[in-house]
Amino acid sequence: MRGSWPLLGHAGALLRDPLGFLERAYPLGDVVAIRLGPKPALLVNDPERVIQILVADASSYDKGFQFDQLRTLIGDGIGTSGGAKHRRQRRLMHPAFDHRHVEGYVAAMNRSVTRTIEQWRDGTRIDAAHEMRILAMDATVRAMFEGSNADADDAPGADSAALREIMASLPVLLGGIGRRALLPLDFLNRVPTSGNRRFDQACAALHAMVDRMVAEHRARQNGTPTAVSAPGETPSLLSTVLAAVDEEDGSGMTDAQAHDEIMTVLLAGTETTAGTLAWTLHVLSGEPGLQREVQQEIDAVLGGRKPAAADLRSLPLTRRVVSEVLRCYPPGWILGRRPIEDVRLGETPIAAGTQVLLNFYGLQHDPAVYPNPGRFDPERWRSPDPGPLRGHYLPFGLGSRGCIGEAFAWSLMLTTIAAVASQYSFTAQPGAVVRPVARTTLHPDSVPLLLTAR
């Protein structure tokens, strides 16, 4: 493929204009040869081959150098581990993310949304990208430490200063990880630039905060990892994780493993959800008619009260809007895999260790599946044909390594949109330009909005 730079290969184009690069590469063939730095790589544009990699041949691949970079920075949690370790960690994490527990977390989500909205007023100007990051982080920490316990005011989730410290570190960390994942030149990371120093400081601060979270939780539990809650209450996410026992060997989660899983949830879960929420508010701000329809649906279901878990199943238009946002702006815009043995991908032989990139963004903008793919159209999801979409709609991945937090993310997104849209209308600030940032996730740089109380 054209556009390779000396030393950087195609990583330069991926860093400079990542979405444009993927769009240009998509029509070039099912599998396109590129270079990332000095290393050869393959870009996969075909849905059947993507399914083959993620499902049929999943055990023949690990997660690639993107996740090598992540592993050195956030630990070996469910998002970065592979093989038997990944399967074990997924078994231990699964109870905390099943539908019963997620429905219980809606109470914590409501408290987080309320904390955010209470700071707004009629005529307030906000950056929705920043506000949604704070909200998603707060909701995740509350779910992690409070569960549905409304009296847990002394939990870290109520610590605004701690949350803001995390949020100061998170954008620096995510931006640096995205660059390091796409441009695997380790010597660049060791140069003592101001950017590298900020990145190292942010990484150290976040690790220290997570250590504090685990230590405080252990202290409250008196060193016994038991998920105990009052009748009718949902235990905290971390309590559930620490109480989990592996059915195969009877072991549980160590503090070090819990640390890595918290880092994974904080980095992967909150940023993807926050980005989708910010994109949703951006889209609705530019389509006042659609915004009114969403508000009318929410008003009819909620009648001014906070949403319960059951209410979220009664918001079909709102869900279609979010589904279309996830298609247009997939958080996981590209995904890496690497074969651990020689494999064949269709007719293409791939040597062990070759970096393979899956073009999720191109697949979700394929005009053969999504007519006029640049147009935002929630009605695509009124009665979609699931057949063609299996390989063309991948916002939460696919197969055994698909996102374990999908139900959590949906609950938080719908809870937030329901609460915000029921209290405010929002319009784009004049002259504002919203730019996509494609690094670790695809998120907007900023979303300036003007709020009007309803």
Image (cartoon, helix red, strand yellow):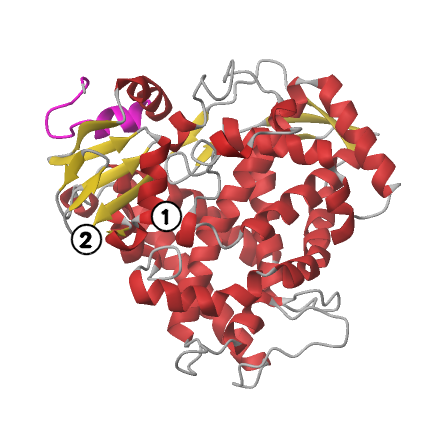
- Magenta stretch in the rendered image: 2-17
Q: Is residue 255 above or below residue 63?
A: below
Which residue in the structure is indicated by mark 2? 340
Q: Secondary structure at mark 1?
A: helix
Q: Of the residues shown, which amino acid type is indicated by label 2?
A: Ile
Q: Position of residue 118 (x, y in %)?
A: 76, 45
Residue 307 vs residue 114, the one in the foreground: 307
Let me know if residue 208 appears in the view. no
Residue 152 location, quadrant: bottom right
- Tag 2's secondary structure? loop
Tell me where residue 94 appears, x and y as whole percent: 51, 64
Is there a contact, CB below 8 Å, between mark 1 and mark 2? no
The residue closer to the viewer here, 102 or 449, is 102
- Placement of 80 over or under 434, stated as above or below: below
Give me the residue at 14% from left, 38% from top: 349
Rendered image: mark on residue 295: none
